[in-house]
Image (cartoon, helix red, strand yellow):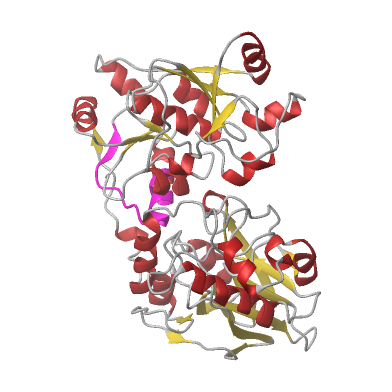
Amino acid sequence: MHFEQFYLGCLAHASYLLVSGEEAVVVDPQRDVEIYLEAAKRHGATIRHVFETHLHADFVSGHNELALRTGAKIYIGPISGATVPHVAVHDGFELQVGTLRIKVLETPGHTPESICLLVTDEEKSSQPWAVLTGDTLFVGDVGRPDLSKAFSAPVLAGMLFDSLHKQLLALPDDVIIYPGHGAGSLCGRNLGTARSSTIRIERLTNYALQIKTRDEFICQLTTNLPPRPDYFPQDAQINRTGAPALSDLPKLTAIKAEDLKQILRQGGVAIDVRTADEFAAAHVPGSINIPLSGQFASWAGTLVDLNARPVLIADAPEQLEEARTRLARIGLDLERGFLEDGVQGWASAGFELEDFEQIQVRDLNARLQSEVTRVLDVRRTAEWRAGHIGAAIHHPLDGFKAKLPDLDRNETVFVMCKGGYRSSIACSLLQRGGLKSVINVIGGFDAWSKAGLPILAEDMVAA
């Protein structure tokens, strides 16, 4: 048997390919499916089966395109409401592919139709080797229970408790778990960075599995949930019906600087995909910086309206294509296009550029010692509570779309996150919102901690 994990850092998404003999199985595929077709071909196999552990809300799946191109069957858990041609699989369903045996475990909780896949390589042992847990069980966390229209978060949290204890924790300790997401995913609260674990390790270290009672589990799982991005329901519906192929999307078109200026005047959106340093040095006024170097698609979907039809700003055609592919992975299929000749095209048209200052952490610390300084921390709540600067106020970036921080437009605001990626996004949004002086903290809280500067760890200070 051949087993392969594909990890898509932009979405913190893990998908899987399993091959035995001349048949291949794909689990939770991303929208651009060539990687699976090429991998199967390298191993002399054809993709015949595609499993979805649930109807994903945080990305658009490639299950429909894979089925159309290979003739593969799609398998989805019960009560999904999926209209894409598929086989509805229930607890105990087994698929035999060569020496590979895949058994379905019904594990509702993250979503009502969630399943996990217990994998046995009969060439090596009659005992299960691994379990693909989708968004039911992560490394260090479990799936959020608030993504269903049909079931309330407390009801799903109760289902999740039962699924974890009756299905997954009943497995042997040495069974390896391969989850559907890693650190940074919006499908949980505080996922670990490891790409796999074991039942034993999670039993001992996963906070959610330490909770003894069902009622307490429900309480903890439904308290302080991060905001749910607006694109989640859209993606779940796309996956329910099956997405069109990426190759069917029209080509991006160039937009002149004069036209972009008019679009921005009318409240339109432009996303600058360059690095934080490049954006800080010079950018189109009113544009939003979401660098390709990080979780670009997730943050675009979180912060930009679904119907915004944003204009892309980049330095090279390769950046534009990459940005478009990443946005398509979450169902944001662009219609407007890109700024012709990028930032240089804007300047050549005679329009002014904006910038903002950046500061090192030791220089920020010196400012804090000598004057009253406004520091805004835009990390998530769990990060903030684990440690933050005493003088900072807290307003997570994922809450900016609902409401920008309540700040005086004329004061200077120093913005920090973990490493500088989210803070650059926040600076661009604050500038777009009318703040006159924003300063990005280079290296963020990681650099602050590494420099040995003072840290507090306490309950959140509200912005």
Is residue 236 in view from this perspective?
Answer: yes
Give the residue at x 38% y 23%: 283
Residue 121 figure quarter: bottom right
Is residue 42 in view from this perspective?
Answer: no
Q: Relative to 408, does residue 232 appear above or below in the rendering?
A: below
Residue 26 figure quarter: bottom right
For residue 328: magenta?
Answer: yes
Q: Relative to 340, does residue 216 appear above or below in the rendering?
A: below
Which quarter of the image is occupied by the N terminus? Answer: bottom right
For residue 337: magenta?
Answer: yes
Give the residue at x 40% y 59%: 232
Left or right: 96 in relation to 253: right
Left or right: 55 in relation to 199: left
| Magenta residues (range) | 323-339
Give the residue at x 74% y 23%: 453
The spot of residue 307 in percent (x, y) is: 26, 49
Residue in front for this viewpoint, 141 or 132 = 141
The spot of residue 105 in percent (x, y) is: 60, 83
The spot of residue 392 in percent (x, y) is: 58, 27
Left or right: 350 in relation to 158: left
Residue in front for this viewpoint, 25 or 412 = 412
Residue 342 figure quarter: top left
How many numbered badges does the structure rendering display? Answer: 0
The spot of residue 309 in percent (x, y) is: 27, 45
